[in-house]
Image (cartoon, rainbow, N blue to C red):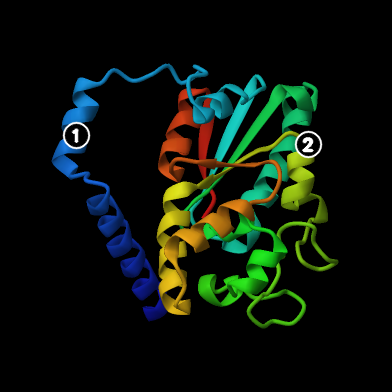
Amino acid sequence: MTDSKLKQRRQFLNSAAATAAAIGLSAKAALLQAADTPAAPASGTDTDFQKWLAGIHGKYRQVYDAPEPNSGFALLWSYVFLMTGAQGYGVPESDLGVVVVLRHAAIPLAFNDALWAKYKMGEVFKINDPATKAPSTRNPFANIKPGDLPIPDAAVDKLIARGVKFGVCNMAITVYSGIVAKQMGLQHDEVKKDWIAGVLPGITVVPSGVVAVNGAQANGCTYCFAG
């Protein structure tokens, strides 16, 4: 791992710790609360998150855990699962359920081109434009151009159209928007609000990526680490 990656990860973890402290949570309190509070049924509909979980369909279900962009492999593997699962299991594609959780440094895959340009996502998250080889000012994983992905049908918008469920981590959005706001001399609340508004249609902002992965598994998804 490069020094810049290590520095960015330390900054993320420090910011996450500060965020937790700011909202009055301690590790001990969180553990005590978890021990005393019965878990809500994962298939319930009490919260937007539970409704999202309840929408996971299919007899054969897979969740891809994507904490890094990893050249879009979470997208590519989702496409491969849809293409080969139907053949392998001898079932229609409607019997296959795919969930992609974008967390940590993979959150920009969920953002529209305007956010990429405004906040220099390519520079922040070290993602180059496949055409220019320079830090990307657009999302090269959604509404793609020729050459962006080795399998064009694996683009985010095309997977959503086929029923793949996407979740993007609110905790990561909170922390990274705070880092970027500080660097740009902007108000954190305004930047986070802008990022939430710029999430692509069909993608749900989930409380955290780790909770989304847990919830997907509780709802019958097999886990696959996607980088």
Disc 2 versus disc 1: nearer the observer: 1
Label tally: 2
Q: Report the residue that reaches farthest toward the right.
A: 146
Give the Cα separation between the discs numbered 2 and 1: 39 Å
Which secondary structure lies at badge 1? Answer: helix
The front one of 47 and 121 is 47
How crowded pointer 2 is (Cα within 10 Å; few <14, some 14-19, many 20+) is rated as some
Which secondary structure lies at badge 2? Answer: loop
- Please report the residue visible at 77 percent of the width from the left and 61 percent of the height from the top: 150
Q: Is residue 139 visible?
A: no
Residue under numbered circle 1: 31
Q: Say left or right for 35 vs 80.
A: left
Q: Say left or right for 74 vs 219.
A: right
Q: Is residue 126 above or below residue 14?
A: below
Q: Of the residues shown, which amino acid type is indicated by label 2?
A: Arg
The front one of 69 and 203 is 203
- Please report the residue visible at 57 percent of the width from the left and 58 percent of the height from the top: 195
Q: Position of residue 217 (x, y in %)?
A: 48, 29
Residue under numbered circle 2: 162
Q: Earlier in the sequence, mark 2 or mark 1?
A: 1
